[in-house]
Image: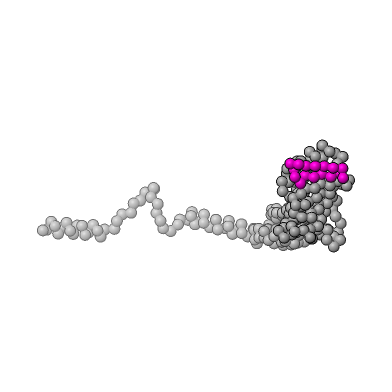
Amino acid sequence: MAGTATGRKSGADASRRPSRRPSGPGVRRFGTPGPRALLIAFGVLLLTAGVLWALYGSTWLRVEQVSTSGTEVLTPAEVERVAAVPLGAPLVSVDTSGIEARLRDRLPRIDQVEVVRSWPHGIGLKVTERHPVLLLEKGGKFIEVDSSGVRFATVKAPLRGVPRLVLDVAGSPSLRRFDADRLLTVAVGVTGELPEKIAQDVRVVRITSFDSITLELGKGRSVFWGSGEHGPVKARVLTALMKATPKAGHFDVSAPTAPASSRS
């Protein structure tokens, strides 16, 4: 019995003894960071604060100049006035997306624009303008239409080399299925499918119905295109037909499998 009691007492004493924590060079201890860790953290904090101050608080990285490239009809002054880049503002805080949206909205002649930061003091406006492929006459002026069918500008005088589009469809049953905008898109597609040499000679694209498109060329010649369907095939056939009958004044490729040409 005495041995048992002694054993129990020894076990209880052992349980009350504080356990030894392992120590040694390979053992990590968690607790209050040492001086080195504090210095590193303080250095990172100072560096971050310095960068933020340089970007937002200092006068080193602020907008001082705006440059514009890519303009043709528009002038750099027009673009920069609409862009309204905030001079003197921190370069990093300039809302480039907002400037791009404002330029496209207020200057529809702009097809694409990229606003870039040019460190340390500049903003660059890289502009791509729309180019007209057709002109719509209205009220003595001309509406320019690009290759996507977008009406983007009104000018007083027609641009040389750009054909006029004549929509003579007032009494056409085509308007029940195809409105003027759809016919405009068809006309744009036709001009885009023509070989360059023929396209440069087109003076007027005349549409009287969806199935009746005529191209009026220089020197009184004309091409009956028919509908806007099978454009690439018609373009190839027209090229061959013009080479085969160079003195013809009228060409018909409305049915490209049975083209025809005549002197009148």
User: Where is residue 117 shown, x and y percent of the image?
Assistant: 69, 54
| Magenta highlight on residue 134 | no
Which span is picked out in magenta? 249-264
Tell me, yes or no, if residue 82 can be seen here: yes
> Residue 12 occupies which quadrant of the picture?
bottom left
- The residue depicted at 75 percent of the width and 45 percent of the height is 255
Q: Which of 234 and 88 is in front in this view?
A: 234
Q: Nearer the viewer, residue 88 or 229?
A: 229
User: Where is residue 178 shown, x and y percent of the image?
Assistant: 72, 58
Name the dominant secondary structure of the magenta segment: loop
Tell me, yes or no, if residue 63 can be seen here: no
User: Where is residue 109 shown, x and y percent of the image?
Assistant: 77, 57
Position of the C terminus, as image quadrant, is: top right
Q: How is the image coloured?
A: one colour
- The residue depicted at 45 percent of the width and 56 percent of the height is 34
Position of the N terminus, as image quadrant, is: bottom left
- The residue depicted at 20 percent of the width and 57 percent of the height is 11
- The residue depicted at 25 percent of the width and 60 percent of the height is 16
In the displayed structure image, the side of residue 19 where residue 106 appears, left or right: right
